[in-house]
Amino acid sequence: MKPDLLSLAQRALFGGEPGSADRTPADRQPTDRQPTARTPPARRVYSVTRLNREVRSLLESGIGRVWVQGEISNLSRPSSGHWYFSLKDREAQLRCAMFRTHNSRAQFAPTEGQLVVAHGQVSLYEPRGEYQLLVEQLEHAGVGALQRAFEELKTRLAAEGLFAPERKRPLPAVPRRIGVITSPTGAALRDILHILARRFPAASILIYPTTVQGAAAVPAIVAALDLASARGECDVLILARGGGSLEDLWAFNDERVARAIARCRERCRAPIVTGIGHEIDFTIADFVADVRAPTPSGAAELAVPDRRIWLHRLEQICARFGTAMRRTLGGDRARLEKLRARCGAAMRRSLASEHASARALLRRLESAHPGARLQAAQARLLQLDGRLQFALQTRLTSSATRVRGLARALQAVSPLATLERGFAVVTRSADGALVTASEQLAVGERFDARLASGSVHAAVLARRP
């Protein structure tokens, strides 16, 4: 127990036991003995400055630093940057000062009527003789207990492995549907929708509305997480809430929410991104989730790619496809020229061979000149010549037919040639499905037609079978 402050002051100022300095003979009990003469004690006269200084020393050494809880009143913030206010309860009040070097580290700006816990040095302001508390640390009432509960739960869940890095899953490169678990009326949802629409409008968004503050928040968040994991219809889930005090964010430090996130991670393929509070706010939900973002907007940016980057990649792919197609067509053209040259050479060789055979036969005929044989030989020569001409013509016709067939086959595999002949590739605008029959389109339904040069977007006016 610390010594009584009044007793300390009396002993320091007057010496002896408390209260002995101001007793007079009349205060003493009467006795039968005659009073004897005594020397009056020497008076110790203090200046006001000295008295205040020694009282301040007694306060600072006798009480020191303390924690005080009370309601803020008479708050003043002068241009010096210091804070001056009073802490009060139902029966008393205490003057307080929090200098700029300390209040610059405060987590919040105090307001009138706010219940807080202050830690500081008990002292006395000498120029006015005012007893005061020099505040060094300021917290919301109850923050200390909440912080201890936070650390205890964090340690316990970490020991169970809920925060283990090997359990965390990577985000999908291109999510098709994004689930958002948050308040449907909060600013966090508006920020998320704005970021998603700007960065990747191709992704659809599914909102799981829930309460994010108050007594009903924890069961509502747990129910939303269980529903999202049971339905399994999203590629990534965002659990978000805007900024607030530790008490405002406390639902996301609840063990039930942490275990619901762990269940969701085990039951469905969608990784969970948290965007809770501001950058300095950390919750238990952040540690359990697969990815933690500093804000709801940051969670939206992490969940989807930037469409500008993907459009640039698409342009590069289109350019590469065009180059590859031109290279393929060039190779086919070169092969066609080789085939044409080979066919010509083969025909010339065949013709030369036939001519050589004819000349050989002619020489044999000339060598066997006698009349009948000559006539028979001439007849046979004519016959052979006719057969030769017929065979030559047939061979030439067959070779020409084959060359034309190869040319048509090559032309047929060229998509550009098909389009240049007036054909078009027709796809349904709604889903991009290829249309090959009139029954696939309804009257009034929109479609896209890819032409040899450009494309058109049109609607069906009528159908003919």
Image (spheres, helix red, strand yellow):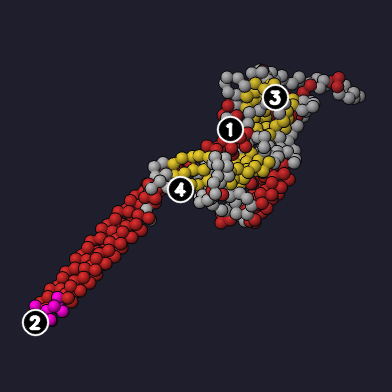
Label 1 sits on what residue type? Arg
Instruction: From the top left corner, tell me how far across and down residue 164 is, in percent.
Output: 59, 55
Task: Read off the residue under disc 3.
Answer: 112
Q: Earlier in the sequence, mark 3 or mark 2?
A: 3
Task: Read off the residue under disc 2.
Answer: 370
Question: Mark 1 or mark 4, which is nearer to you?
Answer: 4
User: In what element is the residue under mark 3?
Assistant: loop
In this view, the residue in front, 40 or 224, is: 224
User: In what element is the residue under mark 2?
Assistant: loop
Instruction: From the top left corner, tell me how far across and down residue 450 is, in percent.
Output: 44, 44
Task: Read off the residue under disc 4.
Answer: 425
Proximity of marks 2 and 4: CB atoms separated by less than 8 Å: no
Near mark 2 (Cα within 10 A), the count class, few <14, some 14-19 or many ≥20, is: few
Task: Read off the residue under disc 1.
Answer: 105
Which residue corresponds to the image point at 59% horizontal and 35% vertical from the top-left? 191
Proximity of marks 4 and 3: CB atoms separated by less than 8 Å: no
Which residue corresponds to the image point at 70% horizontal and 24% vertical from the top-left? 112
Q: Is residue 432 left or right of residue 419?
A: right
Cα separation, mark 4 vs mark 3, equals 72 Å
The stretch drawn in magenta includes residue 184:
no
Q: Earlier in the sequence, mark 2 or mark 1?
A: 1
Give the residues in magenta. 366-378
Label 2 sits on what residue type? Pro
| Residue 16 in sight here | no
Q: Quadrant of residue 309?
A: top left
Cα separation, mark 3 vs mark 2, equals 143 Å
Label 3 sits on what residue type? Glu
